[in-house]
Amino acid sequence: MIRHLFKLIWNRKKSNFLLITEIFFCFLVLFGVLSFIVYNVRNYTRPLGFKHENVWLLTMRPSTDSTAQNRQIVEQVIQRVRAFPEVDQASLISSNAPFSFSQMNNHFSYGDVKRIDSDVYEVQDEFKDVMQIQVNQGRWFGTSDDASHHEPVVINKALQRVLFGEEDALGKIIHVDDSTNFQVVGITDYYRAGSEFSAEDPAVFTRINLKKNPKYFANEMLIRVKPGTGIDFEEKMVKEISGIGKDWALEVATLEKMRQNKAKVTIIPMIALGLVCGFLILNVALGLFGVLWYNISRRNSEIGLRRALGAASGQIYRQFIGEVLVLATFGLIFGVLFAVQFPLLQVFQVDSEVYFIALAGAVVLIYLLTTFCALYPSRQAAAIHPAIALHED
Amino acid sequence: MITLSNIEKVYQTKTIETVALQNVNLTVPKGEFLSIMGPSGCGKSTLLNIMGLLDIPSSGIVTIDGQPIETYKDKELAHIRNQKIGFVFQSYHLVNDLSVMDNVELPLLYRSSISGSERTKRAKAALEKVGLSARTQHYPNQLSGGQRQRVAIARALVGQPEIILADEPTGNLDSVMGEEVMNILLDLNRLDGTTIVMVTHDENMALKTERLVRFFDGQQVSDSKLIANFQQV
Ligand SMILES: Nc1ncnc2c1ncn2[C@@H]1O[C@H](COP(=O)(O)OP(=O)(O)OP(=O)(O)O)[C@@H](O)[C@H]1O
Ligand SMILES: [Mg+2]
């Protein structure tokens, strides 16, 4: 019977062409949207590599350009902040705090591996405690590195993988420029600071050493407060800091709030795409439904004939469902051939697995959709009275 | 054996009520070659549909091999049609998107016990019987009317049914071809014992059969045994 259906569809390929094309495009759209969703959801399920609860970001905007003076004020501020009993720890950070909208990157080479792009985070020794970073191999940097000839850095395993491969990264020197060499002192598992939907991109933490670098200035500070600390303390803290940095503009945001804001950047397009895709599918479904219905009404006499030759009404029902599945299969064959090019050619830097999950999902959805659209018309076909159908022609 | 007792068939449309058959009592014994004649619209096709379990009468009882058909479910009726009955329709009813071969195989497709190669073998044999061996891979719209009629006949006999219901099987054929088709039917009847009910407008064809029933306006008007002629053939 299946061979019979393939033959039937194949012989009707001209009139089925539109339907097959429609299924093909519907599949591609589904595949695209599912790839996007699977990509994000997979990232979402991965650990962030830090704990953002009870962490605040303090942003300070100096009123003057006087670097030396500003630097002095920042040092005073950080000392003051650390002294609050409500504060566990605080660290200055370059402007790319977790869930912020700015990025800082550089490229690094090691041996034959050239120009690997990586996020660079400038942080203080205390950052590890503020963000509760786990160092899996080696150690976090600290005052013991003051004497070191090279700049101590901690990298995440994503950078380790691309830069060093199977080699042990600890102790390795990364030549950055004529005056700077990084030495890997520790490796963390994950660090996905962009957003919860960020991929596991390479990251490197460099050490802010205020003593060695008298001109260094950072205007953002991450502060871990004791659990339960609220707005009262925020006001108190801001007031006190205003006393140190006169006329400085101060802003405090919780990382939780920033996380929510950043997540919207992904979630909103995801919902929008999902909606557009939903409407598209609804459209395709209605079209499919209409075409199937029309096709079946055109084939009344064939249905009557099959009934006369011994098809029970259930067999007619199954035949029409079967035909739609065969049609879908034709559309999907072309669709899948097209879609597998993405993982094969590595068009975007996305895990092949994402594509394969999306592909399988789209195939299943298309079969479900087409079957669903075929249910009612097929039932109509099965209900056709053979004598009347044969009479009509 | 098919028996019809007190059959009435009324077609009800919104505005008019057509009585297609009225007070029909007819028994077709196993192995009989019966022909039916009557003017257009007198209910011949309707009668064949009822005999072929495609339609149910408005009133009256149809039995097949002694069993009233009301006792069968849809699935069982389909099974009986498939196993016991071969149809030749007035307007061929070939599937245009299937080759001649596939059209002829169609009844066998609904018999799960028959393999693909066996289907092909039987379809070939049936096409040979109607003289169309050379056209197996053609499509219906590449055939002449007479050729289509013969494909339809091959399809009716491919399943070796006990009963063949033929609605003007020679209506679209020239006299030579008509003779040939008639001979095929006569052979089926005599050699295989197939019961045949044939509607025809051709007096000569009717006279070759065993029994002739004439209809007028949905009623039987005559029923004559032609057994003498039949034996002469
Ligand atoms: N499905 C139907 N709905 C309404 N009326 C019908 C239907 N089928 C047949 N009729 C009517 O029933 C009557 C008998 O029709 P039928 O097709 O049996 O005639 P027939 O004897 O086969 O004629 P012909 O020799 O032209 O084929 C006709 O008057 C026809 O209009
Ligand atoms: Mg008729």
Image (cartoon, coloured by chain):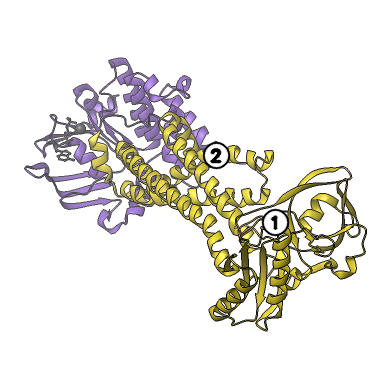
Image location of residue A359, percent across then percent down: 58, 48
- Specify the amino acid type for callout 2: Gly
Relative height, residue A62 to residue A25 (above, below): below
Q: Quadrant of the C terminus of chain B?
A: top left
* Mark number, residue A335: 2
> Are the numbered discs 1 and 2 placed on the same chain, yes or no?
yes
Q: Position of residue B34 (x, y in %)?
A: 24, 35
Neighbor class of circle 2 (other Cα within 10 Å; few <14, some 14-19, many 20+) is many
Q: Which residue is mark 1?
A: A200
**Residue A336 left/right relative to A76:** left
Q: Quadrant of ligand 1?
A: top left
Disc 1 element: loop
What color does chain A have in the rendering?
yellow
Q: Quadrant of residue A76?
A: bottom right
Badge 2 sits on which subunit? Answer: A
* A254 over A316 or under it: above or below: below
The answer to whether marks 1 and 2 mark residues whose Cβ atoms lie closer than 8 Å is no
- What shade has chain B been given? purple
Name the spot of residue A247 as percent of width and height, x first.
58, 65
